[in-house]
Image (cartoon, rainbow, N blue to C red):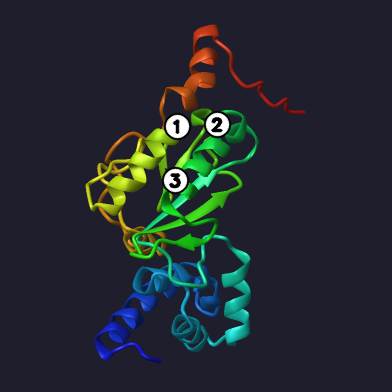
């Protein structure tokens, strides 16, 4: 592996912490967070990272690759510092997601799974960002940017490329880099959990209506 000794030491230390979350004899369950850990170092699931996971968890490289290629959050080639995902699934498309995609893709000069020449932005056409109540939605490094328009989305990627601080609609005050958020997904807290809102009014509308009308879930009958 081409990791330098300092990097390899940190990887081993953090991998040991991840593996320690699982019962003895089930360390291979740590593979998914370890793949996120690799992405936090390399920016993608690198060949070196695959070998490291295989050796650490006593797996074959084929077994590691099978998991890495199954889940869409794992990248198999270097991506951008900011990974931009534009939802074009049914509701987002109806609300303008296709127009947002076209505008951003044309503006950046890249298509799905493409990366800008400066390495700042990678682009993905997302099937669903799980935020239909804010459609159309764009995600940057898995942080939400709600109620987008073509103009707003183009302005967003421009600011990211210029290195300007950008805050998501919900979440931390400033969107983290791809590597920073991957370290979080590996299970290492970033201290930003209490920043910003997590659920806005559209997400809570059903609950609000139920409270106003005094509705509640039916109680399960017991025999």
Rendering quarter of residue 11: bottom left
Q: Residue at x 32, y 47 (%)?
A: 158
Label 1, residues with CA under 10 Å away: few <14, some 14-19, many ≥20: many
Q: Earlier along the polypeptide chain: callout 1 or callout 3?
A: 3
Classify mark 2: helix, strand or loop. loop
Q: Quadrant of residue 182?
A: bottom left
Query: Whole-percent x and y of residue 52?
Result: 45, 85
Q: Residue at x 45, y 45 (%)?
A: 104
Q: Earlier in the sequence, mark 2 or mark 3?
A: 2
Q: Nearer the viewer, residue 217 or 115?
A: 115
Residue 175 visible here = no
- Residue at point 47% right, 55% down? 123
Give the left or right position of residue 129, taking residue 122 as reference: right
Q: Is residue 104 above or below residue 148?
A: below
Q: Please give the label number shown on residue 139.
A: 3
Count of numbered circles on the image: 3
Which residue, given by chain and number where applicable, does mark 2 sit on? 96
Secondary structure under badge 1?
A: loop
**Residue extending farthest top:** 213
Q: Disc 1 vs disc 2: Cβ atoms closer than 8 Å?
A: yes
Percent coordinates x, y for residue 149 in the rendering: 45, 32
Name of the residue lying farthest toward the right: 223
In-image side of 102 versus 168 (left or right):
right
Label disc, if present, on residue 168 of the rendered structure: none
């Amino acid at each position: 592996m081409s990791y330098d000794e300092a990097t390899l030491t940190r990887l081993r230390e953090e991998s040991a912490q991840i593996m320690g979350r699982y019962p003895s004899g089930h360390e291979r369950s740590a593979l998914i967070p370890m793949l996120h850990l690799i992405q936090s170092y390399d920016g993608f699931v690198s060949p070196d990272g695959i070998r490291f996971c295989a050796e650490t968890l006593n797996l074959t490289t084929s077994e590691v690759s099978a998991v890495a290629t199954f889940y869409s959050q794992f990248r198999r080639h270097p991506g951008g510092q900011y990974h931009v995902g534009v939802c074009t699934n049914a509701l987002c498309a109806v609300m303008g997601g296709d127009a947002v995609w076209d505008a951003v893709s044309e503006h950046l000069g890249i298509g799905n799974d493409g990366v800008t020449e400066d390495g700042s932005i990678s682009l993905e056409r997302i099937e669903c960002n799980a935020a239909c109540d804010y459609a159309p939605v764009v995600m940057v490094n898995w942080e939400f940017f709600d109620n987008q328009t073509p103009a707003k989305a183009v302005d967003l990627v421009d600011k990211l490329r210029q290195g300007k601080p950008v805050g998501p609609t919900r979440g931390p005050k400033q969107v983290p880099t791809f590597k920073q958020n991957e370290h979080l997904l590996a299970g290492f807290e970033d201290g930003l959990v209490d920043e910003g809102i997590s659920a806005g009014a559209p997400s809570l509308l059903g609950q609000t209506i139920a409270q106003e009308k005094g509705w509640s879930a039916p109680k399960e009958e017991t025999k």
